[in-house]
Amino acid sequence: MLPKHNRYDYSPIFERPDYAWPDGKRLAFCAVTNLEVYAYRKGTGWDPAKMGEPQNQRNYAWRDYGNRVGVWRLFDMFDKLGLPAAHNINSLLYDDHPQIFDRIRARGDEIIGHGRTNAERQGDLWELDEQRLIDDVTETIRRNEGKPPKGWMGPAASESNTTPDLLKEAGYRYVMDWPADDQPFWLKTRAGPLLSVPYPAELNDSASIIHRRNTPEQFADMIVAQFDEMVEQCADQPLVMTVSLHAFVIGQPFRLPALRRALTHCVEHPKRDRVWWTTPGAVADYCYELPPGIVPGSNL
């Protein structure tokens, strides 16, 4: 027998009920950054030169560029374009990077749980240890922000067989580790349904630029093509387009002009009135208010 999961059932998009986002919008557009902190010379982490390199001062400093420089360029770009944003946050970032959170709060952006550090993978942990990790992240964000995060994105989208169960039990409303759809859908957990909000494995600067060796212009072209296609497709079905941005990757100066071109294309598009410029948490909140039977899996 082929190994399977029991988290969701097959649901072809053309068979689903129609609905609209707030104010009759048809395409929800979410810009999401990944703001990460790494262990020095230990754990896991990408290298700018080649895959599989050991952890050293060079690749640690390259990744830290995102927190020192790259994220500030992205904040400025979002401000100029009038874009809201959400941020996948490693909770250990709170220890030494308070200015980042000041800017996030000033913008009114969403904070999403993203593990403690991208130097570790929760999928490698025993259930009790993973529960402690999730609780640690949740409490750190709650203590600093006055409320817990609504959503979760695992470091490197890592999950164990029990991650959705643990997230639901910890009070999370949605997860972004299942890139199976262009619409939200409900995952089954032992504590009840947990919403999956679309998050891209493809439209992701780390996957595109680091792994597939695409140029910044190629990544920007992907954003443009995705938007142009989805802004037409959304006439038939409400859709979610999320762009994944890592501050230490796309925040490099020579890559920023291509991203700026792509995002400007989106916000100035002739059919921009179809678009809800929003965050994953707002998408999740809206789905929770829809009647049962609308979002796939909600009739369970």
Image (cartoon, grey):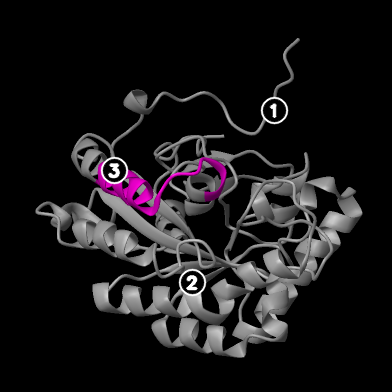
Let me know if residue 251 appears in the view: yes
Q: Nearer the viewer, mark 1 or mark 3?
A: 1
The local secondary structure at tag 3 comes to loop
Residue 23 shown left or right of residue 108 in the figure: left
Task: Give me the disc on residue 110.
Answer: 2
The local secondary structure at tag 2 comes to strand
Asked if the magenta segment contains residue 73, the reply would be no
The local secondary structure at tag 1 comes to loop
Magenta-tinted stretch: 210-227
Query: Residue 78, image x and y in percent?
Result: 34, 73
Residue pointed to by mark 3: 19
Judge whether 143 appears above or below 269 on screen.
Answer: below
Tell me if mark 3 has few (under 14), some (14-19) or many (20+) residues whose alpha carbon lies within 10 angstroms of its own: some
**Which label's residue is closer to the chain start, 1 or 2?**
1
State the count of labels.
Answer: 3
Tell me where residue 30 sits by quadrant. Answer: bottom left
Q: Nearer the viewer, mark 2 or mark 3?
A: 2
Judge whether 182 appears above or below 57 on screen.
Answer: above
Label 2–label 3 contact, CB within 8 A: no
Name of the residue lying farthest toward the top: 1
Disc 1 marks a residue whose amino acid type is His
**Which label's residue is closer to the chain start, 2 or 3?**
3
Asked if the magenta segment contains residue 214, the reply would be yes
Residue pointed to by mark 1: 5
Residue positioned 44% across, 44% down in the render: 214
Residue positioned 49% across, 49% down in the render: 209
